[in-house]
Image (cartoon, helix red, strand yellow):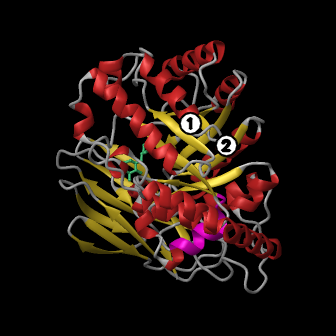
Amino acid sequence: MSMTVRRMTRAATAGLVAAAALTAAAHSAEAADTLGSAAAGQGRYFGTAVAANHLGEADYAATLDREFSSVTPENEMKWDATEPSRGTFTFGSADRIVDHAQSQGMDVRGHTLVWHSQLPSWVGSLGASDLRTAMNDHINGLMGHYKGEIHSWDVVNEAFQDGGSGARRSSPFQDKLGNGFIEEAFRTARAADPAAKLCYNDYNTDGVNAKSNAVYDMVEDFKSRGVPIDCVGFQSHFNSNSPVPSDYRQNLQRFADLGVDVQITELDIEGSGSAQAANYTKVVEACLAVSRCTGMTVWGVTDKYSWRSSGTPLLFDGNYDEKPAYDAVLSALGGSGDPGGPGDPGEGTVSCTATYTRTADWNSGYNGQVTITAGGEPISSWTATVTLPAQQSVSSLWNGTPAWSGNVMTVRPSWNGTLAAGASTSFGFTVAKNGSDAAPAVGTCTAS
Ligand code: XIL
């Protein structure tokens, strides 16, 4: 019943959606470039993951609407959210995101149909024959509901194991249906919405390695046998243990050469300041160098709601201020930043970033250093938080004034609050490990 209502609603509001998109385009022509407008100039989309429960926050919605041309529901289209019990489809939260996106003229990526995670337990308890039916029903249920409204679907997510084996990951689908479940899911998906691009999506496949080789072999096999597949998604969750691979572009290119589009689907890069910015530049440049890299999606609008928030991996800080990574992405996309005219987004907003390094290390302790860098405006003060692992304690701190709440240390300047635009200062501290060698987490820097 709800499916029928939705289709009628879609058709009736199509005219309104087109009008809203035109208004948005007219506005952006007068202002500085945005991520979406700059990417469009390169023939790409620039998207973000969105959570329905934040759409009511004015700054969240304003940043989303201004900057992005595509959205991916972060959790709302997953199996546990959409079919919590067999045959009962719940689309409320996902519909809110799709409606919002359409009112802004944004595209929607569908994420995700068949995945071992965020899978309700009833699916895992089915026998093989029922499971096959349930998988196909789920694909048909989701893709039918949003037919014609999704530019790309992640049909199958994360079906390969990590490590060097290139083997399939154990899941109810793999274990009960065997290797053929992926092919079956793609065939069902093609029939359900022929207009949607059908993607295979995974992580740790961003460079050339055993896992990406296994995905490559599968895509090559699908193309040779006419199994419908249009794109491969590279999640691209990066941090110091999993850095941007040096052969990222080459890897994207070899997939594109198989005759599929490639998309960067869940980009986030932990870090801050110029190092994080440089990594974002590498990713954007790699995509732009591959003509079949059709777009990029970052995995969230603001650091404060990131699934890895302690790693501050996104382009906007917790105050929705543009980070150096934002400027780097905009410039790599060929966009021009804020020209400084009155009324432009970002004008007059002060910001800072905080980057942590361990500068000395011995058996029982270490020295940490946090570098504070002002954003595009001069600042007169800053505040940074450092969360220590539970066992550790700080024995001294210099070039800053600490205040404590449990194991969270909030540091303000001692003499070094005033920074010119782009200038840096740092504070240092000595930590007693007390048996834990883990690194502290540095939170969002706030400037005034
Ligand atoms: C993550 C979401 O960001 C979190 O909110 C949720 O708790 C877990 O899933 N690979 C994927 C995404 O394909 O769906 C995951 O999203 C991140 C890893």
* Mark 1 residue's CB less than 8 Å from ligand 1: no
Residue plotted at (80% across, 50% down): 42
Q: Secondary structure at mark 1?
A: strand
Marked residue nearer the N-terminal end (2 or 1): 1
Asked whether residue 374 appears in the rendered view, the answer is: no
The dominant secondary structure in magenta is helix
- Number of numbered discs: 2
Residue picked out by circle 2: 282
Residue 388, numbered label: none
Residue 430 screen position, x and y as percent? 31, 58
Residue 427 screen position, x and y as percent? 43, 66
Q: Is residue 392 left or right of residue 39?
A: left
Magenta segment:
60-69
Q: Is the C-beta separation of discs 2 and 1 under 8 Å?
A: no
Residue 234, numbered label: 1
Residue plotted at (51% across, 79% down): 58
Residue plotted at (30% across, 22% down): 129
Residue 446 screen position, x and y as percent? 48, 74
Give the camera-side residue of 67 and 174.
174
Residue plotted at (71% across, 24% down): 259
Check disc 1 and give the amino acid type. Answer: Phe
Q: Is residue 161 left or right of residue 273?
A: left
Check disc 2 and give the amino acid type. Answer: Lys
Give the camera-side residue of 99 and 13.
13
For label 1, count other residues whose C-alpha is less than 10 Å away and answer few (under 14), some (14-19) or many (20+): many
User: Taking 401 as reference, is 290 above or below it?
Assistant: above
Q: Secondary structure at mark 2?
A: helix
User: Taking 32 as reference, is 289 above or below it?
Assistant: above
